[in-house]
């Protein structure tokens, strides 16, 4: 009988110590939750953290101050504000094209970009998926890179954007994401100028090059002011052959 009582006492002691330990851990968790999120509930805290993350714009690689002087030195007629506005319009219309499954909504951009959008729409249809981009809003757009390669000059705009983004099946049932929670993301938008058509890899890009309006000769010099064959001024035409070639989400 004494042995049974001793065992019961020990069990009660263990349970009491366990209760104290659990209570201490629970209090520490609550203290952390109050400190981190202002609430005793960890679940509410995680929900607040997710909401804060969903409402915080992505940072962009802001290299405009470094690259814009180089760009305007090569192309004196380059209008930054105009091109930035065009880049933002391309991004929004690209997302809207995917949302509405209508590639014709993309008005600006070369054939390469239009083909890419059309291909993504067709792939989604084949997979029974529909991507949604609702209430698109751009926070900030900057030049992130300026490159000269393979006969092209490439300016990369990077835009921080938010939208209600989710996927659904063909019946409208949400299969990915949350239609009531904002998505924060960022995209690169590539703007290209064909500098030397002899170096361009894809034949369909040839039409992006500039020809002299007087003699028809190709203008291949970077930021050329006059035609090297007949001397006709062409500086004011350079800006017209910039075109958008890619839109890509980045992490």
Image (cartoon, grey):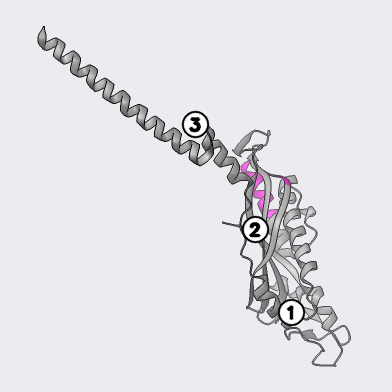
Cα–Cα span, label 3 and label 1? 56 Å
Pick the quarter of the image with the C terminus: bottom right
Residue 187: image tag: 2
Occupied quadrant, residue 19: top left
Closest to the camera, between mark 1 and mark 2, is: 1
Note whether residue 130 is visible: no
Circle 1: element type? helix
Q: Which residues are magenta?
A: 118-135
Q: Decide: is 119 above or below 148.
A: above
Residue 158 position within the rendered picture, expressed as x and y whole percent measured from the top left: 66, 62
Closer-to-camera residue (197/191): 191
79 left or right, relative to 50: right
**Which mark sits nearer the N-terminus, 3 or 2?**
3
230 left or right, relative to 55: right
Closest to the camera, between mark 3 and mark 1, is: 3
Closer-to-camera residue (215/138): 138
Which residue appears at 49% of the width and 40% of the height?
Answer: 35
Circle 3: element type? loop
Pick the quarter of the image with the N terminus: top left
Q: Decide: is 81 above or below 137.
A: below
How packed is label 3: few (under 14 Cα within 10 Å), some, or many (20 or more)? some
Cα–Cα span, label 1 and label 2? 23 Å
């Amino acid at each position: 009988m004494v042995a049974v009582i001793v065992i019961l006492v020990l069990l009660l002691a263990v349970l009491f110590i366990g209760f104290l330990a659990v209570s201490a851990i629970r209090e520490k968790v609550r203290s952390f939750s109050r400190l981190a999120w202002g609430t005793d509930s960890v679940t509410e805290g995680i929900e607040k953290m997710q909401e804060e993350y969903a409402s915080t714009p992505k940072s962009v690689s802001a290299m405009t101050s470094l690259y814009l002087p180089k760009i305007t030195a090569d192309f004196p007629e380059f209008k930054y504000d105009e091109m930035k506005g065009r880049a933002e319009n391309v991004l929004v219309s690209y997302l809207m094209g995917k949302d509405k499954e209508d590639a014709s909504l993309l008005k600006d951009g070369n054939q390469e970009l239009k083909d890419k959008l059309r291909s993504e729409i067709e792939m989604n249809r084949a997979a029974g998926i529909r991507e949604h981009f609702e209430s698109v809003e751009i926070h900030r757009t900057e030049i992130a890179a300026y490159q000269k390669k393979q006969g092209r000059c490439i300016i990369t705009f990077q835009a921080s954007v938010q939208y209600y983004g989710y996927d659904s099946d063909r019946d409208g049932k949400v299969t990915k994401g949350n239609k009531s929670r904002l998505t924060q993301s960022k995209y690169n938008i590539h703007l290209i100028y064909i500098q030397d058509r002899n170096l361009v890899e894809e034949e369909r890009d040839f039409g992006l090059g500039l020809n002299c309006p007087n003699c028809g000769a190709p203008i291949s010099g970077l930021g050329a002011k006059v035609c090297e064959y007949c001397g006709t001024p062409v500086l004011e035409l350079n800006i017209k052959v910039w075109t958008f070639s890619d839109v890509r989400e980045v992490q």
